Image (tube, grey):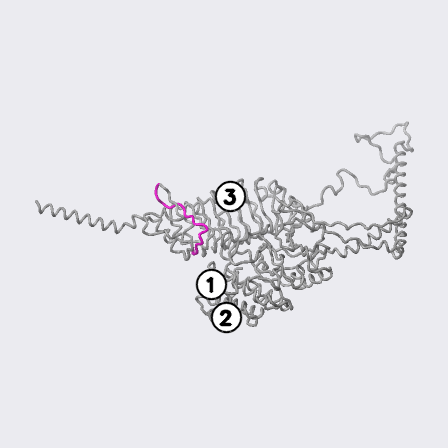
Amino acid sequence: MMMSFSTTDSEHYSLWSFCVFLFFLLCPSFGLNIDGTLLLSFKYSILDDPLSVLDNWDYNDASPCLWTGVTCAPDMFRVTSLVLPNSKLLGSIPAQLGFIQHLHTIDLSNNFFNGTLPISLFTASELQVLSLSNNAISGEIPESIGGLKSLKLLNLSVNAFAGNVPLKLTSLQNLGVVSLRNNFFSGTIPSGFQFVEVLDLSSNLLNGTLPDEFGGDSLKYLNLSSNKLSGLVSPQFAKKIPANATIDLSFNNLTGEIPESVALSNQKTEFFAGNIDLCGKPLKKLCTIPSTLSSPPNVTTNTSSPAIAAIPKEINSTPLQNSYGNTESAGQDQPQHGLKPGTIAGIIVGDLAGVGVLAIVFLYIYKLKKKKASEAKIESSLDKDQKYNKTPEPTIVVVKQKDTTRRSSSLASWPCLTITNGEETSATGSDTDENKKNEIEEQVEYEMDEKKKKERSFVMVDGETELELETLLKASAYILGSSGASIVYKAVLEDGSAFAVRRIGESGVGKLKEFENQVKAINKLRHPNLVRIRGFYWGDDEKLVIYDYVSNGSLANVGYRKVGSSPYFLPYEVRLKIAKGIARGLTYIHEKKHVHGNIKPSNILLTQDMEPIISDLGLHGLMHGKNSCKPDNSARHFGSKRSTSSRDGLNDQPIHGSPYIAPAGFVGCTSPYHAPESLQSLKPSPKWDVYSFGIVLLELLTGKVFSDRELSQWTTGPVVDDKNRVLKMADVAIRADVERKEETTVSLFKLGFSCASLNPQKRPTMKDALHMLDKVPGYSHY
């Protein structure tokens, strides 16, 4: 009995031990489901997590539902969303993320993700929200995105995507919001998108014409601005746009007349700006001559004089008609060869009118001859009457501020450029000589007006642009920025063309001729990597300089490391392209025996093709005079096409797309981009530009500005030969490219440090720097 109990107890104990062993063996599997395992693959793909947001993602956890950024469905403990925006995560998006069965929300915006999107991500059938904006993701969007039947929001803006907009994207019936702005999409805009409410394709490289079959009744916002669209805006396209929708077609190459449409006529004029050959409402530029200028309908034009017009061309040769158009037969008692009383009266009135016209002509000729004789007499009197030769006050440019709350206004409402005459010349005389005095005063005023026209000059110096001051005054003006000595405007003319206009309040140059000579000297320096100066206006109190407007912002607006709302990512090859362009422009300047003296990111503009354009050449003397330093105190600015982000170490306050803000100055100015010796020397040297170029090149490579102390560590010892240490300084956003191009990157770092040497004698010339850059393999996609 006892033996039997022991055997049975032993068997139960062994079974229990096996179950416990099996439980512990399988415990992790029971605790962490398949969704948690797939999420861990996401964690392992992260190369840098500076905020430690993934620290609580542990394989031994019972559930992933308590992990940071993870949400689960309460009824089945399956992962439904992954939300980790603004987490500074660096890495790539793994394919395993697309295998999470019930995942409906992915928000990884404002991070440092790079690489391409895995195909598996577009097989997540329950995915409703995909937001990956403000990263460094590249590649093309595959047509398999059409498999996301549940997708409601797609935000891939501010990345480096390229290729065509997928056709399958246009047919997703649940998709309401699509933002692909600030990428490198090319090709034509596909038809469709009939279910979309918000569509933003702005700031890409899209070309071709606007599709006829586009949009639907749900459309509320459409932004196609800053692309390369061309051709007509077809009536079919306009009909598809709902009346209450907002449409932005600005800064393309659209032509022809805007079709009559309630939706298009309700838009602001700025939404069509930048299309020079576009006309019609709501633009002020009309396509045809207004009907009010043509002859009224049903009115016969008669070129004969009044007297001749009143005489019948044939008397009694044509039967008379009554008011109903019926022919009246002549009665026997009617005279056959006489004129009716009404006809005789018409002839008399016509004759009198003709005589009146002749009298007016003779009177005009008499007055004209008398005026010429009077002017000859006045000219002889001017030499004798010196008291009337007093020079009046010069033309005053009155400052008038109008409606400062408006974003856009006409150029006439700028705080400048409202032109009035100076004080009238006063003179005294006896009452008997009053008429003569008035005539002399009129002639003196005429002579002085001619002199004032010379002192108030509006000159286009490029020999190509036809622009009049009156046209400029009517332009819509957008404030781009301001400093202590100037205000910068974007002027959009009625035809849609845009210029950048810099208003100089207090100029260091006090003579028109000197100002004109300097502007013309700048105009002679023409190079693809230099901004074009078009003309200037000279007044006693106001000076304007007119430039080409560059709409894609400046290098200072580019967020290299995608911090916050940084505008867009610069791929490795684009950074190299920018460096080469700057070097070409500076080499040309130095070959022409000039020095820029103020190279910095806000003075490097970027075209739509990311070609750098150097600005602010030769204007420091016009702004402040010689040997002066007025630091740039411009604050944040308005009217930017792209957002402006703050950057560590950047002391320069940029103005979007504006090369026209006052430079920091040469002598006695402190800026990380100015050569140290510029604080002591009054004579600019090309080596100053070489130093500035070196700082900018290093900033392109690292995303930060180097201080003098940091430069001294890298340029005075063998530390620059430490390859591993150099590569670690590279911007994390391009780290993947750096690993594939280590030798090239090290060469670029060495060139940057060589140019930024604290010893001017050790810096290469810009020509040598350009020669070294040209040896680096070029870019293939930009």
Q: Is residue 173 visible?
A: yes
Rendered location of residue 599, percent (x, y): 59, 62
Upstream in sequence: badge 3 or badge 1: 3
Q: Amino acid at mark 3?
A: Val
Q: Quadrant of residue 308?
A: top right
User: Where 22 sits versus 781, above or below?
Assistant: above
Q: Find numbered disc 2 in the image and state the secondary structure of the residue it sits on.
A: loop
Calculate the distance from the C-alpha at mark 1 to the C-alpha at mark 2. Answer: 18 Å
Rendered location of residue 529, percent (x, y): 60, 62
Query: Which of the two discs, 3 and 1, sits closer to the camera?
Result: 1
Calculate the distance from the C-alpha at mark 3 to the C-alpha at mark 1. Answer: 44 Å
Query: Which of the two discs, 1 and 2, sits closer to the camera?
Result: 2
* Number of marks in picture: 3
Q: Is residue 365 visible?
A: no
- In the picture of the structure, the residue carrying the numbered disc 1 is 729
Is residue 76 in the magenta section? Answer: yes
Q: Which residues are the magenta region?
A: 75-92
Q: Find numbered disc 1 in the image and state the secondary structure of the residue it sits on.
A: loop
Front residue of this view, candidates 439 and 746:
439
- In the picture of the structure, the residue carrying the numbered disc 2 is 716
Q: Amino acid at mark 1?
A: Met
Q: Quadrant of the N terminus?
A: top left
Q: Find numbered disc 3 in the image and state the secondary structure of the residue it sits on.
A: loop
Packing grade of label 3 (10 A; few <14, some 14-19, many >=20) is many
Upstream in sequence: badge 2 or badge 3: 3
Q: Which mark is residue 196?
A: 3
